[in-house]
Amino acid sequence: MGLHRVVEPAGVLPQAAWRLDPRPEIAPNEVRIRVERLNLDAASFRQLWEKHDGDGDAVRAEVLEIVATRGKMQNPVTGSGGMLIGTVEEAGRRSPLGFKPGERVATLVSLTLTPLVITDGLSGWDGRSEQVPCDGWAILFARSIAAVLPEDLDPQLSLAVLDVCGAPALTGRVVSRYVAERAARGGAPVTVAVVGGAGKSGSLSLAAARRAGAGRTVGVVPVAAERDALVAAGLADAVVVADARDPVALSTAVTSALGMPADVTVVCVDVPGCEHGAVLATADGGTVVFFSMATSFAAAALGAEGLAADVTMLVGNGYVPGHAELALGLLRDEPGVRGLFEARLAAD
């Protein structure tokens, strides 16, 4: 689990640690990766971008400072990190991950618990995108999760998909259960709302919900340009524009599009303040899945209580068995998903 890498405070797991020891020498059950690209999670990058008023040099400087100070990439405001791709340099003789030197891999665990050193000063990054070309090394533990990069996809595209692969996997699992329960008792089709439906995790979640048997889906986006892109992608039965931070507006938009509140609401936005709207947009007995690291779980729980909302709330922890294969399969099989991802990468 990497406990021996925790510098301070003692006794906590690496994710909760303030500082990790990123020395390159590996233990027998560790793996050292030569890093070629980081993918900062959306909430973290947005916070840094807004803090520095779009000054890419300042964003780059702060990322360097965080990594140098903490031995890992963990945004001190959002608490989140991202993930990376690179090449296996050395694998310990007792590592259970099964990697060999020379294999290109993507880590499927957060940078917030991954010992990391950057050696090139991020000279190839302008600080203006979530994907960060760099040179350095990172350490994987025995309990870490990583995947060999597929040869048929561009590494940047794979990185973008694998960064959010937990979202469609959990969405599919939740929707499948609802579909099975409804089928058993002859109930109405399952309705699903995805807030942030044109984004990376949102578009994959819409595709996963449809594949799992959702009867009707709605994608919620903040601006007309994203509405047009999501409509063109054909991933949702309806697309609406609403500010997810406005509870009444979000609830009204979802209910109007579906004819009722959603059975399952999936929150995939990178801004805070969307908790109450998601609860209000969900039917009694329904489920809200939070995949945004900008979520305040206190606000979600207390908001549901204050609204007397009988909803189940799930924290998307980023790991579901088979999540990488499922997300990459959706990318390959769904032209709309791939188009949105490629357009996002081109814009970055």
Image (cartoon, helix red, strand yellow):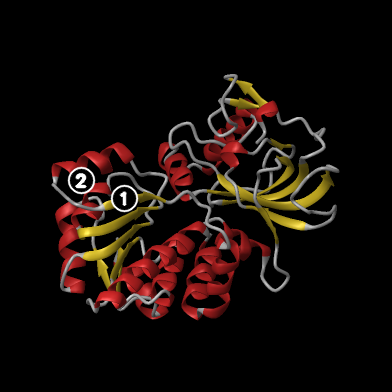
Q: Mark 2 points at which residue?
A: 304
Asked if the residue at tag 2 contacts the one at tag 1, i.e. Cβ–Cβ closer than 8 Å, the answer is yes
Q: Residue at x 24, y 79 (%)?
A: 186
Q: Name the residue under label 1.
A: 313
- Looking at marks 1 and 2 on the same chain, the residue that comes earlier in the sequence is marked by 2
Observer-nearest of 9 and 143: 143
* Three-letter amino acid code at the position of disc 2: Ala
Give the x, y percent position of residue 121.
Answer: 69, 37
Residue at the farthest front position? 184
Q: Residue at x 84, y 55 (%)?
A: 102
* Three-letter amino acid code at the position of disc 1: Met
Give the x, y percent position of residue 176.
Answer: 39, 70
Give the x, y percent position of residue 216.
Answer: 29, 76
Q: Can the viewer see residue 80 in this picture?
A: yes
- Spatial CA distance of label 1 from label 2 is 9 Å
Q: Looking at the picture, does residue 98 appear above or below residue 161?
A: above
Observer-nearest of 166 and 62: 166
